[in-house]
Amino acid sequence: MEGGLVRLRAIVDHLTPSERKIALYILEHPERIVQASVAQLSEWSGGSTAAIIRLCKSMDVSGFQELKLKVAGDLHGTDTNYEYNEIRPHDSIQSIINSISSNYIQSIKDTVKILDVNLIEKAVEALLHANRIFFFGMGASNLIAIDAQYKFMRINKTSFSFADPHIQISSATTLKQDDVVVGISYSGETDFVVKCLKHARKSGSTTISITRLSDNTLSSYADIPIKMTSTEKEIRSGALSSRITQLNVIDILYLGVVSRNYEESIDYLQKSRKAVHEKE
């Protein structure tokens, strides 16, 4: 059990002042809180016991004991590199190669620590039995939606993605109960994607969201809210690391469906590969 520090770093800027005070103390002194009580952490951090309980809720953990277990797991893990490597003016190409690659690797590792296996299982089952699958995203997230649509199409899952936001919303109004909708937005606040899931929810379709680890509007409309994290500073890096982690989550869902319908999926993949390389 790990991911406590990852969760705190992901949500610290979105916490209330009282919760943030406690979160920053834990991030600065993780070793100290592993054996602490709620009362001790309250005294050391200057935050109230009520704020500690609210922080646990914001982290999506069951309570203070689970928080401590996740932090302890981080401290005993082998991965201790949590520094985000920002690109600087006139960096060497070697430095850029090392920084970007390190950021991508760290984002995927951090996301693996916080992924809820039960929610992934539910999402895979929903996608496996869906009549139609719709992937909605804007900007960089739309590229993820297109990639997902292509993957699922290759295993004969009827799937759609649209670049035009108005077509996305129009298609969302035609959904039925046996359809599945996947809304992709790292912030979870992309207006058009939120509207799509809102319409999908009204239709009775199963809704899945892929967002950052925080309370957000898109997740509130999802039957299956999948949370991820990224090491990047969004404004500077232009959603680079988050795009990689979104792709990783999509691939997990895709291969989860393939594994549960293996023989048939492999047959369709072989057929499409053969057709693509077929000479006239």
Image (cartoon, grey):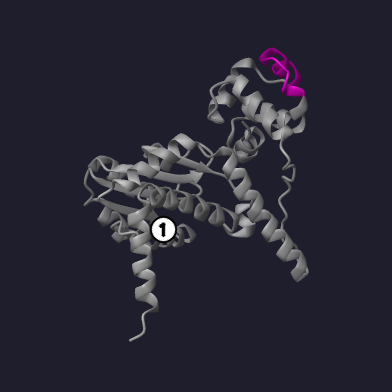
Instruction: Tell me the crowding category of disc 1: few under 14, some 14 to 19, or many 20 or more residues within 10 angstroms, Cα based.
Output: many
Residue at the spot of label 1: 148
Residue 91 versus residue 103 in the image, above or below: below
Residue 75 percent across, percent down from the top left: 73, 33
Residue 271 versus residue 199 in the image, above or below: below
Q: Quadrant of the C terminus?
A: bottom left
Residue 160 percent across, percent down from the top left: 31, 59
The magenta-colored residue range is: 32-44
Residue 43 included in the magenta stretch of the image? yes
Residue 273 versus residue 165 in the image, above or below: below
Residue 37 percent across, percent down from the top left: 69, 14
- Circle 1 sits in a helix, a strand or a loop, which is it? helix
Q: Residue shown at 58%/20% (left/top)? A: 53
**Residue 26 figure quarter:** top right
Q: Residue furthest toward the front?
A: 263
Q: Residue shown at 74%/46% (left/top)? A: 81
Q: Residue shown at 37%/73% (left/top)? A: 274
**Residue 138 figure quarter:** bottom left
